[in-house]
Image (cartoon, helix red, strand yellow):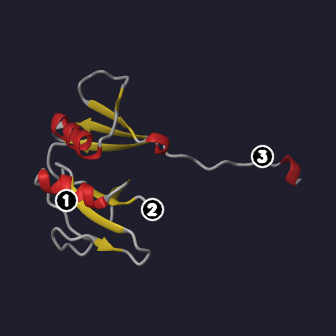
């Protein structure tokens, strides 16, 4: 019986869609801070900007959010960078507020596994985590 059962493969992430109120502002934020490569999107309606996340999939920004919504920090996108200290310098240069997990401003969290992480919000209040690529 086991030989006739097809092997199931796990689903893989295709994309993450983030609903934004100002597409141009949000696209610049993600492109400039995270250095994400913009990719072609098929709709060409001025309401979408797509970015490649490499093997992880894609990030789709979608114009249309009517109001800023409060988002919980537990729901966040996480990106790893080669140097969190260099990234923190970029945030400071661009005057983007960031904090550690408990919320202490301009202070990274040092996890028990030695990974440093920080949190900040995009223009619509979506939380982002940045951590060391280790």
**What secondary structure is marked by label 3?**
loop
Which residue is the extreme one toward the bottom?
A: 112
- Residue 65 % position (x, y): 20, 42
The 10 Å Cα crowd at callout 1, few under 14, some 14 to 19, many 20 or more, is few
Q: Quadrant of residue 85?
A: bottom left
Q: Is residue 71 visible?
A: no
The 10 Å Cα crowd at callout 3, few under 14, some 14 to 19, many 20 or more, is few
**Mark 1 lies on residue:** 70
- Residue 29 % position (x, y): 20, 43
Q: Is residue 60 visible?
A: yes
Q: Residue at x 19, y 62 (%)?
A: 98
Q: Are marks 2 and 3 in contact (CB under 8 Å)?
A: no
- Residue 33 % position (x, y): 24, 46
**Mark 3 lies on residue:** 6
Which residue is the extreme one toward the left?
A: 95
Foreground mark, 2 or 1?
2
Q: For the residues marked 3 and 1, what is the alpha-carbon distance in whole angstroms?
A: 44 Å
Of callouts 2 and 1, the N-terminal one: 1
Of callouts 3 and 1, the N-terminal one: 3
**Mark 2 lies on residue:** 134
Q: Is residue 9 above or below residue 109?
A: above
């Amino acid at each position: 019986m086991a030989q006739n059962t097809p092997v199931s493969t796990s689903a893989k992430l295709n994309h993450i869609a983030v609903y934004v109120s100002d597409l141009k502002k949000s696209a610049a934020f993600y492109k400039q801070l995270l250095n994400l490569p913009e990719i072609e999107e098929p709709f060409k309606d001025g309401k979408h900007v797509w970015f490649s996340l490499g093997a992880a999939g894609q990030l789709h920004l979608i114009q249309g959010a009517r109001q800023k919504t409060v988002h919980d920090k537990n729901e966040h996108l996480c990106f790893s960078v080669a140097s969190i200290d260099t990234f923190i310098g970029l945030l400071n240069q661009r005057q983007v507020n960031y904090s550690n997990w408990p919320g202490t401003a301009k202070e990274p969290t040092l996890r028990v596994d030695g990974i440093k992480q920080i949190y900040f919000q995009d223009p619509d209040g979506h939380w982002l985590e940045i951590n060391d690529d280790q």
